[in-house]
Image: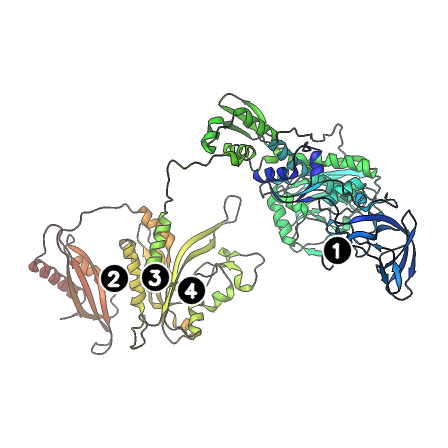
């Protein structure tokens, strides 16, 4: 935002302070000054002249011989511009004047020239050649027509004076997103008043008489998008150029002058920070409302573009149609023009969120949007309207018919108690109570009362959005008093950041996956239905979190599962010649569980582990490696449970015996295990197994692939519930015995382990695990050879061979009774 130093001087006296110091102090207080430009012309010795006569050049069809009156006589200039006409007053550079070379960007002194056989006694200048094109004096190319911009301009004046090059500096400031109050000249002046401890020369304009009128009705249909709406009704307006002083001030602020009505709305917006919009009153039907647009509704804006709206768009509408995109862009059907004689001047408070969404819905952002999005001062809206109406009376001859308004333009008061000792505790420096009070009062805070240790302050309406706590008051004091006055000191105690339990567990899972030979992958959280269909993965449409304005159909929603992502990476690697693929990913999945509101997004995020393995267990160039199978992925998952110490809370169940069998088409129905969390109500928290043969054929894989998925949030919740139990280190050795047998292949390992566990004294039983499975040659059809390793340990004595053998015989007997066709092997 560009701010004129002369304009600032009207509200706070800065005449005795160098502009460099002003810029430095503003930046150090938190309002960055990105650049300081002295408002002086690059050109020299350019005068105003009047075009008296235009003749054709005798040797060129495109050039003209222009006779101009310089007040000291007539001069002939060769000119090729097409926008000149007799009677215009334009800039004239005589020989020796400094003008801009448009090709090099450098200034040069004009020399005598003969153009196509005719001597040119100088040149007529465009805004480019004067180096002022960025100030937006006119939109058309060609010579700068001064009397069109400044009607009172006369012949023989210095163009420097005409264009308003009085001694001034332009500060280019960059207010932060939370400081809407700094988006105005008054707001910046208030900061400078506090920084340099100078009085602020400003009091809001107040209405001294009743301006209410019943000739127009306004209504807010959704107070989530607008809290206060007002219209000033003005008649008998004369549309004409605004006075030179206003045009020069607008141009210095980077705003193009248009006419008196538009210029007044821009001028007061820059001054107060309150955006306006002017409607042609005769194009309205006596009623306006603020409402959300209907999906697909259209409006033609002031740039003659028809825009299609969404429910995020906010409209100002009459009884039948939209007439303005609220706080964003005016409508063509209600714009003011040269024939306008009456206007409805809008001043309103549109909420930051609604304005941001509305501007985004049409892909357009204006200066008004920049202010509404930061949050304007709702209590300044009416005083700003009074100021604009006053200027309309003075500069456009308007007659005020009245003001119509609806909604609330007052905020609930915010009172904050400031404890003086807390300031030193937070900043480490002593600042006197008098200095603190002075700073806050200069910034607009009102002291309500206090004593030697504390004071209570009323927060001004323009700071109600970002000052709500005592620490915010301390921050205001710190930045105005000067951050450079805070002496750096070493902290008395260095506290290292703690790693959360969630981070520790996630890191442990990462380490274990990598230790098992898997490679981590990271995929996009956005997926589309084509990817889900490709891998036969169903999704719950009512629980999908869709993306607005998706880049393509492949990125339309947040993923509900990682399965599609890991399978897609596996397939891409396989198609590129990779056969041994061991990948995993830890990431979030997203499910819509409720409608979003101010307190919640309505989306449940779940930290999930998923992966795919296929190919050989060991990649070897000189011998064939062992192929990955169901027990490979089962071993990985059991190792994970063991490392996380949750094995006792986990039960593996065949897929076909769970409700998941009907919803997981990607999994082999008989070679998949569901990971169930035991408890009062057992629930599945994951699964692992072989991908379905149909999916394998669809993907054209010539080898088996295995996939797994685990809800890490559930795992973390188990670990959080766990009460650590400590036991002393064992004094006596652990004994391991292997037991091999042939058994019916339909018998599950889980059932066998239960029999083993029930056959051994519980005080010495430490666990059992499968370490070998074989089906094939020398084994009867329908049977499998299985080998278990049984672990035993007595905490009070060394186990003797007699005791060990007795326990092993008990296991054999119990297995024989349970499975009559079992055949033990040596």
Answer left or right for 147 relative to 172: right
- Judging by the rendered image, the residue that carries numbered circle 4 is 566
- Judging by the rendered image, the residue that carries numbered circle 3 is 514
Q: Is residue 809 above or below residue 470?
A: below
- Judging by the rendered image, the residue that carries numbered circle 2 is 750
Q: CA distance from mark 2 to mark 3?
A: 28 Å
In contact (CB < 8 Å): disc 4 and disc 2 = no
Camera-side residue: 691 or 35?
35
Mark 3 or mark 4, which is nearer to you? 3
Q: Is residue 523 above or below residue 698?
A: above
For marks 3 and 1, the one nearer the N-term is: 1
Quadrant into which the C terminus falls = bottom left
Camera-side residue: 651 or 440?
440
> Tag 3, which secondary structure?
helix
| Image mark for residue 35 | none
> Tag 4, which secondary structure?
helix
Q: Would residue 215 be visible to someone looking at this image?
A: no
Q: CA distance from mark 3 to mark 4?
A: 16 Å
| Residue in view at x 58 percent, y 35 percent | 464
Q: Position of residue 404 (x, y in %)?
A: 73, 36
Answer left or right for 403 relative to 90: left
Q: CA distance from mark 3 to mark 1?
A: 60 Å
Camera-side residue: 215 or 398?
398
Answer left or right for 264 relative to 758: right
| Residue in view at x 61 percent, y 48 percent | 356
């Amino acid at each position: 935002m560009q701010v004129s130093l002369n304009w600032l001087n009207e509200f706070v006296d800065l005449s005795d302070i160098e502009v460099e110091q002003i810029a430095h102090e503003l930046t150090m207080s938190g309002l960055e000054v990105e650049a300081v430009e002295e408002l002086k012309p690059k050109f020299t010795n350019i005068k105003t002249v009047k075009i008296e006569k235009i003749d054709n050049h005798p040797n060129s069809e495109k050039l003209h011989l222009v006779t101009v009156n310089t007040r000291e006589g007539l001069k002939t200039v060769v000119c090729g511009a097409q926008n000149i006409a007799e009677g215009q007053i334009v800039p004239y550079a005589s020989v020796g004047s400094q003008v801009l070379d448009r090709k090099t960007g450098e200034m040069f002194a004009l020399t005598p020239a003969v153009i196509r056989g005719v001597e040119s006694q100088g040149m007529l200048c465009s805004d480019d050649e004067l180096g002022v094109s960025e100030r937006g004096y006119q939109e058309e190319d060609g010579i700068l027509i001064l009397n069109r911009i400044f009607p009172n301009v006369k012949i023989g004046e210095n163009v420097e004076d005409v264009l308003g090059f009085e001694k001034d500096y332009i500060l280019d400031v960059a207010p932060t997103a939370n400081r809407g109050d700094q988006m105005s000249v008054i707001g910046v002046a208030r900061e400078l008043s506090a920084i340099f401890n100078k009085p602020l020369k400003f009091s809001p304009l107040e209405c001294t008489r009743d301006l209410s009128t019943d000739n127009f009705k306004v209504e807010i249909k959704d107070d989530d998008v607008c809290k206060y709406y007002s219209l000033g009704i003005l008649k008998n307006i004369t549309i004409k150029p605004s006075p030179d002083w206003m045009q020069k001030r607008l141009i210095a602020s980077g705003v193009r002058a248009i006419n008196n009505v538009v210029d007044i709305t821009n001028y007061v917006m820059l001054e107060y920070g309150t955006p306006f919009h002017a409607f042609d009153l005769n194009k309205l039907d006596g009623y306006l409302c603020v409402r959300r647009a209907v999906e697909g509704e259209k409006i033609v804006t002031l740039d003659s573009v028809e825009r299609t709206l969404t429910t995020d768009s906010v409209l100002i509408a009459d009884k039948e149609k939209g007439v303005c995109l609220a706080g964003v862009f005016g409508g063509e059907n209600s714009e003011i023009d040269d024939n306008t004689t009456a206007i409805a001047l809008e001043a309103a408070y549109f909420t930051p969120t609604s304005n941001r969404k509305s501007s985004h819905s049409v892909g357009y952002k204006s200066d008004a949007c920049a202010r509404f999005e930061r949050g304007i001062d709702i209590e300044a809206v009416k005083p700003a309207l009074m100021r604009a109406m006053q200027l309309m009376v003075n500069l456009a001859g308007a007659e005020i018919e009245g003001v119509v308004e609806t909604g609330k333009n007052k905020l609930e008061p915010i009172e904050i108690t400031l404890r003086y000792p807390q300031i030193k505790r937070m900043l480490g420096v002593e600042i006197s109570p008098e200095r603190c009070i002075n700073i806050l009062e200069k910034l607009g805070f009102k002291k309500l009362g206090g004593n030697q240790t504390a004071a209570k302050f009323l927060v001004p309406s323009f700071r109600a959005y970002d000052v709500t706590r005592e620490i915010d008051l301390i921050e205001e004091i710190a930045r105005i008093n000067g951050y450079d006055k805070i002496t750096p000191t070493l902290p008395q105690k260095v506290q290292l950041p703690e790693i959360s339990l969630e981070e520790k567990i996630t890191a442990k899972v990462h380490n274990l996956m990598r230790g098992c030979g898997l490679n981590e992958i990271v995929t996009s959280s956005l997926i589309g239905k084509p990817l889900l269909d490709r891998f036969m993965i169903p999704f719950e449409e009512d629980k999908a979190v869709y993306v607005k304005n998706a880049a393509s159909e492949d990125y339309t929603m947040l993923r509900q599962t990682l399965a599609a992502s890991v399978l897609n990476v596996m397939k891409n690697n396989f198609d590129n010649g990779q056969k041994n693929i061991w990948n995993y990913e830890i990431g979030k999945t997203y499910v819509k569980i409720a409608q979003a509101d101010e307190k919640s997004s309505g989306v449940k995020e779940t930290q999930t582990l998923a992966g795919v393995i296929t190919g050989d267990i060991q990649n070897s160039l000189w011998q064939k490696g062992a192929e990955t199978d169901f027990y490979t992925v089962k071993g990985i998952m059991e190792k994970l449970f063991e490392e996380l110490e949750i094995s006792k809370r986990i039960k593996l169940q065949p897929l076909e015996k769970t409700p998941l069998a009907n919803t997981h088409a990607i999994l082999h129905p008989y070679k998949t295990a569901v990971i169930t969390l035991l408890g009062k109500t057992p629930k599945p928290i994951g699964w692992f197994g072989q991908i379905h043969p149909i999916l394998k054929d669809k993907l054209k894989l010539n080898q088996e692939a295995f996939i797994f998925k685990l809800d890490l949030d559930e795992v973390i919740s188990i670990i959080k519930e766990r009460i650590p139990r400590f036991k002393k280190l064992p004094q006596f050795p652990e004994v391991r015995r292997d037991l091999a047998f042939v058994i019916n292949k339909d018998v599950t390992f889980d059932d066998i382990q239960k029999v083993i566990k029930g056959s051994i004294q519980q005080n010495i039983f430490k666990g059992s695990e499968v370490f070998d499975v074989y089906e094939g040659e020398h084994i009867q059809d329908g049977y499998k050879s299985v080998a278990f390793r049984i672990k035993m340990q007595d905490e009070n004595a060394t186990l003797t061979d007699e005791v060990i053998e007795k326990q092993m015989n008990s296991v054999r007997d119990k297995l024989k009774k349970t499975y009559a066709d079992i055949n033990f092997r040596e």
